[in-house]
């Protein structure tokens, strides 16, 4: 259950962002599932290392540099996926990272926590 929830939340947020922004494109449900698996794995293994390495910058920017890290990880996921997952540029990745973070907080607070009791 520990990895299943982040995977499902990533899949939902990727689909929502892809539905609203033309610079963020996923080729269907299959690409969404694969992108979600890759993003969940990257977030599990690579993100903590990047956060530790960039801790001084993150503290100096009051945590806003975490959005840059998330945008870079989204771009890495897009690069690993090829044409099935396309992000038009860093600006779009940064906007998507911010929206995905907001959606993750909302899903966690209003959907996951009430049913976890």
Image (tube, helix red, strand yellow):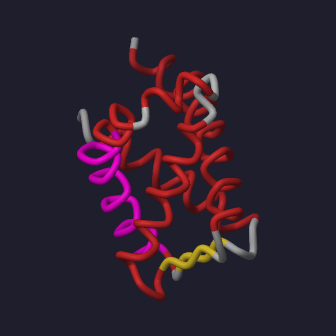
Q: In the image, is 58 to the left or to the right of 5?
A: right
The count of marks equals: 0
Residue 89 occupies quadrant: bottom right
- Residue at the spot x=47%, y=88% of the render? 83
Vertical position of residue 42 compared to residue 111: above or below: below
Question: Which quadrant holds residue 18?
Answer: bottom right
Task: State the residue at coordinates (46%, 50%).
Answer: 10
Q: Is residue 71 left or right of residue 42?
A: right
Quarter that holds the C terminus: top left
**Quadrant for the N terminus in the image:** top left
Q: Main secondary structure of the magenta part?
A: helix
Q: Quadrant of residue 52?
A: top left
Rendered location of residue 112, percent (x, y): 47, 27
Q: Residue at x 70, y 67 (%)?
A: 19
In the image, residue 108 sits, relative to residue 46, either above or below, namely above
Range of magenta residues: 29-47
Whether residue 105 sits left or right of residue 1 in the image: it is right
59 or 3: nearer the viewer: 59
Q: Is residue 46 left or right of residue 22?
A: left
Rendered residue at 34%/37% (across/down): 53
Residue 32 within the segment the image draws in magenta: yes
Between residues 20 and 65, which one lies in front from this camera angle? 65
């Amino acid at each position: 259950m520990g990895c299943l929830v982040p995977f499902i939340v990533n899949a939902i947020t990727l689909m929502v962002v892809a539905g609203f922004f033309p610079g963020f494109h996923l080729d269907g449900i299959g690409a969404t599932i694969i992108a979600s698996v890759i993003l969940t794995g990257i977030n599990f293994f690579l993100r903590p290392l990047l956060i530790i390495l960039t801790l001084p910058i993150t503290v100096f920017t009051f945590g806003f540099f975490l959005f840059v890290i998330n945008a870079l990880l989204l771009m890495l996921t897009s690069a690993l996926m090829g044409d099935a997952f396309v992000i038009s540029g860093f600006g779009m990745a940064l906007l998507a990272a911010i929206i995905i973070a907001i959606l993750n907080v909302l899903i966690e607070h209003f959907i996951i926590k009430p049913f976890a009791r």
